[in-house]
Image (spheres, rainbow, N blue to C red):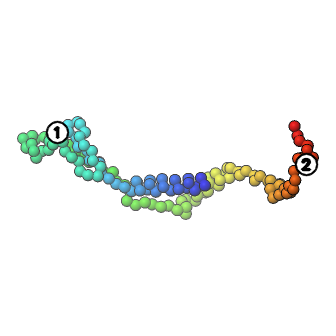
Amino acid sequence: MKYVLLHKVFSVALSTLVLLSTFSFTIEKHYCGDRLVDVALFSEVDGCGMEMDKLPDLKKSCCKNEVDLIEGQDEITIKAFDDLEDIQQQVLFAYIYSYFNLYESLPKKVIPHKDYSPPLLISDIQVLNETYLI
C-alpha cells in the first residue's frame, strides 16, 4: 500500500520536474533610479510615468528596464541501460543487487492451531458441577 503511494508521489514529482525544466519565461523589471518599481513575469512591465517621450528635454533618463530570459530545455534526452558503458553497467548492477539483498524478510509466523475448531459446547461443565475458580 505505501509503495503504491510512494510510487505515485515520485511519479508526480518527476513529471513536474520535467515540465518545469522545459518551461521558459521572461522576467521584466523596471527601475526608476536605483529603486525597483515593477516586476512582471508573463506581461510587459508598467512604467513609472517618467518615460522619455513625455520628457524630450532630458537627454538621459533615470529609468531603465531589465529583461531576464530564463530558457528551458528544448530536447529531453532519454538514456537506456544499454547506452551506458560496460563498467557503468556493472557498477549500477552491483549497487542495485547489494541494495536489494541488504534487507532480509522476516520469517512467517507458524500458527499450529490456526485451522483447529474447538468442540461445540452443549452445556457448561463448571456450572453443572458447581466448581468455580477463585
Q: Residue at point 55% right, 63% down?
A: 82
Quarter of the rendering containing residue 55: top left
- Left/right of residue 13 with respect to residue 45 in the rendered view: right
Q: Which residue is mark 1?
A: 62
- Left/right of residue 80 with respect to residue 37 in the rendered view: right
- Left/right of residue 34 with respect to residue 105 in the rendered view: left
Q: Nearer the viewer, residue 37 or 98?
A: 37
Q: Residue at point 23% right, 36% down?
A: 34
In the current view of this chain or complex, which residue is farthest to the left?
A: 57
Tell which tag, 2 or 1, sits nearer the viewer: 2
Q: Residue at point 15% right, 43% down?
A: 49
Disc 2, SS: helix
User: Which amino acid type is marked by label 2?
Assistant: Leu
- Left/right of residue 118 with respect to residue 53 in the rendered view: right
Q: Is residue 47 above or below residue 1?
A: above
Quarter of the rendering containing residue 121: bottom right
Rendered image: mark on residue 128: 2
Q: Is residue 91 visible?
A: no
User: Which amino acid type is marked by label 1?
Assistant: Cys
Q: How many marks?
A: 2
Q: Residue at point 56% right, 54% down?
A: 5
Separation of marks 2 and 1 at Cα, in angstroms: 108 Å
Q: Position of residue 47 (x, y in %)?
A: 19, 45
